[in-house]
Image (spheres, helix red, strand yellow):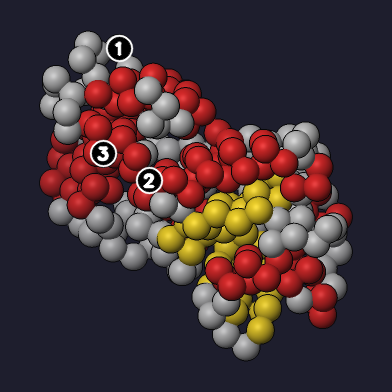
């Protein structure tokens, strides 16, 4: 898995405080590698992360319906693993209206994430997506059926990927790894097409640390009354005030609240 960041070591500390025996703590907390007992609980995309240049998070506006909550969890993963993120909003031809497409895309652009709107059918955004993955080793991740294979075919028709391959995967359990397919798009560009993911859990993040993985909070959090404010029920919270003022996306904030609940 490679070396841990200081944040990750701190998060493992929280996990060990509750789960590990005291005699094991010193050894594990001073190791810069993820412990085997913890690694086996990590989703396969986390285990792959250290061998990637970036993660392309693919979601669709319809069929299946847009799930921004999963996008946000993948973005937490990229923040946790110090991995570059690309948000790909696919099947724009199925969106209810063009305004919805731009509104969702702008949320992530405003935070600073590379965001591309695509449609393999129109086609739209294919060249822009290719420019973002060119000369890199990327993984395409998202729900089954969001169109990862169709996008790869649109980028390079010679790949001739069967479109129904992704939808045929069924994750009967959380993070069930079936088969990761590796495609060489060109001489210097490689893509890992990951099986569809339904749920993404984080056993190594304590709920009080969740706020650090929403980068748009940072500029406002320093103005909160309490230094340990987690931006949920505290008074004089500058982050909540920014949400009410429209400076932080209410959609992202709701996702954050759900993320907090899932970690408790």
Of the image marks 3 and 1, the number of the one nearer the N terminus: 3
Query: Residue under circle 1?
Result: 233
Element type where label 3 sits in the image: helix
Characterize the local packing of mark 3: few (<14), some (14-19) or many (20 or more) Cα atoms within 10 angstroms.
few
Q: Is residue 204 left or right of residue 106?
A: left
Picture quadrant of residue 225: top left
Element type where label 1 sits in the image: loop
Of the image marks 2 and 3, the number of the one nearer the N terminus: 2
Of the image marks 2 and 1, the number of the one nearer the N terminus: 2
- Tell us which disc is closer to us: 2 or 3: 3
Question: Do the residues bearing badges 2 and 3 touch, measured as CB atoms within 8 Å?
Answer: no
Residue 131 position in % (x across, y down): 59, 73
Characterize the local packing of mark 1: few (<14), some (14-19) or many (20 or more) Cα atoms within 10 angstroms.
few
Gap between marks 2 and 1, in whole Å? Answer: 31 Å
Picture quadrant of residue 12: top left
Is residue 40 something that shows in the picture? no
Q: Quadrant of the C terminus?
A: top left
Query: Residue under circle 3?
Result: 218
Residue 79 position in % (x across, y down): 37, 50
Query: Which disc number belongs to residue 38?
Result: 2
Gap between marks 3 and 1, in whole Å? Answer: 18 Å
């Amino acid at each position: 898995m490679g070396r841990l960041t200081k944040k990750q070591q701190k998060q493992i500390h929280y996990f060990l405080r509750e789960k590990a025996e005291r005699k094991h703590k010193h050894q594990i907390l001073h190791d810069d590698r993820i412990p085997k007992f913890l690694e086996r609980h990590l989703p396969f995309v986390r285990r792959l992360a250290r061998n990637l240049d970036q993660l392309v998070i693919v979601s669709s506006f319809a069929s299946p319906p847009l799930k921004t909550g999963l996008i946000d969890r993948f973005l937490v993963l990229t923040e946790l693993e110090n991995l570059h993120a690309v948000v790909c909003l696919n099947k724009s031809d199925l969106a209810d209206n063009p305004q919805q497409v731009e509104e969702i895309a702008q949320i992530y652009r405003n935070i600073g994430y590379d965001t591309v709107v695509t449609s393999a059918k129109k086609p739209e955004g294919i060249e822009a997506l290719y420019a973002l993955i060119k000369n890199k080793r990327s993984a395409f991740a998202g729900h089954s059926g969001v169109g990862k294979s169709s996008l790869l075919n649109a980028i390079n028709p010679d790949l001739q990927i069967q479109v129904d391959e992704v939808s045929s995967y069924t994750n009967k359990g959380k993070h069930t790894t079936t088969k990761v397919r590796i495609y060489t798009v060109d001489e210097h560009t490689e893509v890992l097409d990951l099986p569809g993911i339904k749920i993404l859990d984080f056993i190594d993040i304590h709920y009080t640390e969740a706020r650090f993985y929403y980068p748009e909070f940072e500029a406002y959090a320093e103005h909160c009354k309490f230094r340990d404010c987690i931006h949920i029920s505290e008074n004089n919270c500058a982050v909540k005030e920014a949400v009410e003022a429209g400076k932080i996306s209410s959609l992202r904030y709701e996702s954050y609240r759900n993320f907090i609940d899932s970690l408790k």
